[in-house]
Amino acid sequence: MTVTTQHDPPPGAAPPAETAVPPDPADLGAMFDAYARDLLRYAAQRVGEQVAEDVVAQTFLVAYEQRHQYDSTRGAMLPWLYGICGNLLRRHRRTEVRALRAVAAAQSHAADEVAPDARSAERVDAQRTVARVATALAKLPRRQREVLLLFAVAELGYAEIAQALGIPLGSVQSALHRARTKIKSALAAPGGSR
């Protein structure tokens, strides 16, 4: 699914950075135009496209309802929206964990099939790696998984993650370090990627 708006840059153009003056939180349309694509990409990675559309729509409704709580002096609008989106995604945690486990099971099953040539062998190795990563992600504690996904999928910086989750910067750094360590361990385990 692709979200397009009249304000989208031409194909191939670099995505716009956070504007110096964010949209007014009372202007729901401007907020949506400016940030829906980023939030949808992040949410779709977490819970799939159909649920992500609902979560992003809810994110903007909650942001509009809580517009009086947004303080531009505390940081950019996008991390604030990621924080709201993250709270809504937590409600879908069971769905997310089930999806990760399903990916792991499907990839493991597909990897068990015989590979007749080198290219097929590479695909099997990739499927096994995806299964291991999905399993490891499903086993991560909620905070570590959220920090890792905000960093890797949403491409937020440490300070933005801290703002989005409402936690100290040091907690972001330690959670990300722990999550990375667990993912690396899962990949290095016997039978993992080398």
Image (cartoon, rainbow, N blue to C red):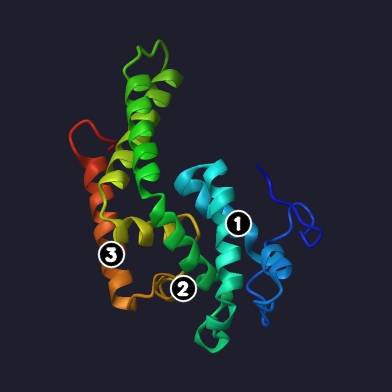
Q: Secondary structure at mark 2?
A: helix
Q: Disc 3 marks which residue? A: 175
Q: What's the CA distance linking mark 2 and mark 1?
A: 21 Å
Observer-nearest residue: 135 or 53? 53
Q: Quadrant of residue 39?
A: bottom right
Q: Earlier in the sequence, mark 3 or mark 1?
A: 1
Q: Quadrant of the N terminus?
A: top right
Furthest residue to the left? 190
Q: Quadrant of the C terminus?
A: top left
Would you call the spot at circle 2 few (<14 residues within 10 Å), some (14-19), or many (20 or more)? many
Does residue 174 appear anywhere in the picture?
A: yes
Residue 156 visible somewhere in the drawing: no
Residue 143 % position (x, y): 31, 61
Quadrant of res 78: bottom right
Q: Which residue is mark 1?
A: 57
Residue at horizontal 25 percent and vertical 35 percent from the top = 192
